[in-house]
Amino acid sequence: MGLAKVANSVQGSIINNSMGTNKVLQSLCNVGILASEVGYALASKLDRSVPAPTSRIDRIVMESRQQSEKNEVPNEKKTAIVTGANCGIGFETAKALGRAGFHTILACRNAEQAKEAVERLERQTGLENRFEVMVLDLASLESVSAFVEQFKARDCSLDVLVNNAGLMMSPYGKTKDGIELQFGTNHVGHFALTTGLLDSLKRAEDGARVVVVSSMAAFMTPEINYECVELESKYNKTNNYAISKLANMTFAKALARKLEGSQVTVNVIHPGSVATNLTRHVGTSSIQHAAENAMLLDVNAGALTTIYAAMSPEVEGESGLFYSRCLSMSMHPKALDQAEQDNLWAYTEKIIAEKTKSK
C-alpha cells in the first residue's frame, strides 16, 4: 500500500471513530487530522519511491495534451479559470493548465499582483498570450456579477473552472455585502461565480470540469452551524474556517447531483497541508515560517491534486467525488446528506438575493 493510501486510510479511520457532536471526540478527531497531515508531509519528503510532485505534474500535463489530440476540440481552443491564481496552489495550477494548452484566466482580486504573476508564468513557461488577468473579488457579489457578465460577453465555452481562492482562520470580518468573511469568500462568492457560469460550462463540447478546493478541515466541524456564520459572538476563526470548507464540500456534492446527465463534472479536493501565504493569519514569526516549510508540503505537492482533478484523463467522467492525494476518499457525512445540500443551497441563494436586492 502506497504512502498516500495509508494516509487516507488513517484519516478515514480517525474520522469514522471520533468525528461528531461529542466535543471531546471531535477534539481528538481534530488533533488526529492535524497530526496525520504533518506525518504525511514529513514522510512524503523522505519517501524516495514516490516520483517528485513536479514529475507527476509533468506527466498529467503530457497526458492531457495527448488526450487533447483525440478530443473534438484541442486544448489550445479551450478556456480555464483559476481563482486566486496569483500565488501558491492557484499559480501552479494555472501554470499546468497553460502548459497543457488551455487559455488560462487568472481571476484575482489584486490586478497588479495578478499581472506580475502572468509575467512570471510567461517567463517560466516560455508561453506568450496563454495567460490573462480578470479582476475578481469573491468578497463582493457586485464584483462576482461583473466578472460573470464580462466572461459571458465573450460568447465562448468554459472548459475548466477551479475554485481555489480562499481565506484561512482570519480575524472576524465581513465581506462588502456584510457576510462573515470566511464563509462569504470561501463559499458564497464561489457559489455565485459557479452558478453564474453554468451556461458557459455546459457549452463545452468535450465536457467541462469544476474543481472545488476544500480541505480536511471540513471534518473538524460536525456540521454547518449557521449561527456561527450569522452571529459575531459565535465566531471562532478555526471553527468558521472548517464550516466554510464543509460548505465547499457540500456545495460541490449538491452541484454534481444537479448536473447529473450533463457533460459538466464537479469534484472537490483536499490539497494537503501546504506552506503558502494562506496561513498568514495563523502566525507570522520567522520561526513559524521555518517550521511550516519543514513540516508542510511544498506548493507543487499541494497543487498536484487540484491539477489532477482539473485535467487528468483518469478523472474523465467522474463527478461528485472527493480527492485527497490524487485518491478518492469518503466525504463528510453532512456533505452526502441531500437535505443538508438543499438547505445550504437555499440558504446561500437567499443570502445572495437579499444582498443584491438591497443595492
Image (tube, helix red, strand yellow):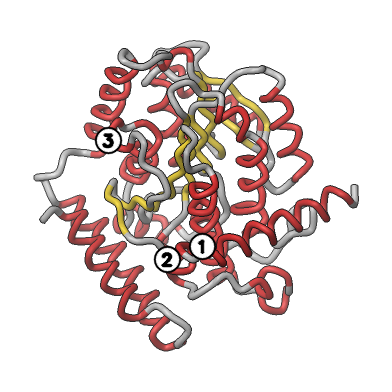
**As drawn, 196 above or below 8:** above
Residue 332, disc: 2
* Amino acid at the residue labelled 3: Glu
Query: Which residue, given by chain and number where applicable, does mark 3 sit on?
Result: 314
In the image, 344 versus 116, the foreground residue is: 344
Sequence order check, earlier mark of 2 and 3:
3
Does residue 266 appear to the left or right of 179 in the view shown?
left
Pinpoint residue 284: horizontal percent, then vertical percent: 51, 59
Residue most toward the right? 359
Residue 246, disc: 1
For discs 1 and 3, the disc positioned in front in the rendered view: 3
* Amino acid at the residue labelled 1: Leu
Q: Residue at x 28, y 29 (%)?
A: 60
In the image, 189 versus 56, the foreground residue is: 189
Sequence order check, earlier mark of 1 and 2:
1
Does residue 28 appear to the left or right of 52 in the view shown?
right
Pinpoint residue 177: horizontal percent, then vertical percent: 79, 53
Sequence order check, earlier mark of 1 and 3:
1
Residue 281 visible in the current orientation: no
In the image, 114 versus 313, the foreground residue is: 313
Give the Cα distance between marks 1 and 3.
25 Å
- Residue 220 placement: quadrant: bottom left
Residue 164 visible in the current orientation: yes
**As drawn, 138 above or below 355:** above
* Element type where label 1 sits in the image: helix
Give the Cα distance between marks 2 and 3.
23 Å
Asked if the residue under mark 2 is in contact with the one under mark 1, i.e. CB atoms within 8 Å, the reply is yes
Does residue 55 appear to the left or right of 158 in the view shown?
left
* Amino acid at the residue labelled 2: His
Q: Residue at x 41, y 56 (%)?
A: 289
- Residue 307 placement: quadrant: top left
